[in-house]
Image (cartoon, rainbow, N blue to C red):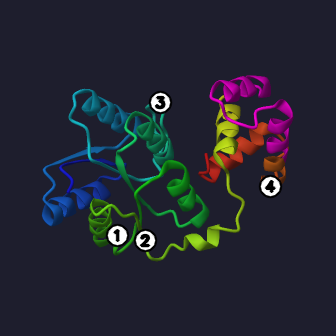
Amino acid sequence: MFQKVLIAEDFQGDNKSIVDTLKSELNIAEIQEEYYCDKAFNRLKAALNNQEAYDLLITDLSFKENHIPQKLTSGVALIDAARKVQPDLRIIVNSMEENSVKIKSLFDTYHINAYVCKGRQSLDELVKAMHEIGNGNTYLSPQIDLNTAKNVFELDELDLFILKNLAEGLSKKEIRYKLKKEDLRPNSESAIDKRVSNLFAEFGAKNSTELVAKLIREGLI
């Protein structure tokens, strides 16, 4: 089913439990662990370049900051980067997050294969998730109901593109140029203004900086 697995988790106890379970229950041949997203991503890239790609990434969403500067500071950032270099990588998120909107966004935007809530049954669920993925299915912890997220404001591909570029400090004119370059529509300045205004209203933000900060805190970008 899976021969090579990478775990990105910054709590040593959680890592050990996952590794022990995968070895005993699924006989995984090779399991590597990383405590930082940057190191996990570098390991993914190196394996891919050496034609020894990982089959599966298991990652948390939250990683504590420390004295070492990191480019990728969250599980979402790691997933986004990993998807760009290895689109077919299977990904399981193993996290305490129970917000259905955030979890639905992970499936819709980043196409994760499974979401397992940390808890008393999470190791058993992790094994179930891997079996489901191996059979071509997705898996979601039973206590999460994505139907509750359907009537909540959702960010589409264009919203995410605009927000990520605003977060990087680009002007609306520069964002418009990038939209045109990547053939994303609508890409007029008026369309961008309308999108941003709607986002301001929806999230109660007064400016782009406040909007981006709120969405980062919510884990939506």
Q: Quadrant of the C terminus?
A: top right
| Structural distance between the alpha carbons of marks 2 and 4 | 29 Å
The mark that comes first in sequence, 3 or 2, is 3
The residue beneath circle 1 is 122
Asked which secondary structure carries label 2, the reply is: loop
The mark that comes first in sequence, 3 or 1, is 3
Residue 9 pos. (x, y %) = 36, 50
Classify 41 as above or below 7. above
The mark that comes first in sequence, 2 or 4, is 2
- Residue 29, visible in the rendered structure: yes
Q: Which mark is residue 69?
A: 3
- Residue 169, visible in the rendered structure: no
The residue beneath circle 2 is 141
Indicate the amino acid at tag 4: Glu
The mark that comes first in sequence, 2 or 1, is 1
Classify 16 as above or below 89. below
Most common secondary structure along the magenta stretch: helix
Classify 143 as above or below 69. below
In-front residue for pair 200/162: 162
Asked which secondary structure carries label 4, the reply is: helix
The mark that comes first in sequence, 4 or 3, is 3
Circles 2 and 1: CB distance less than 8 Å? yes
The residue beneath circle 4 is 202
| Structural distance between the alpha carbons of marks 3 and 2 | 33 Å
Circles 3 and 2: CB distance less than 8 Å? no
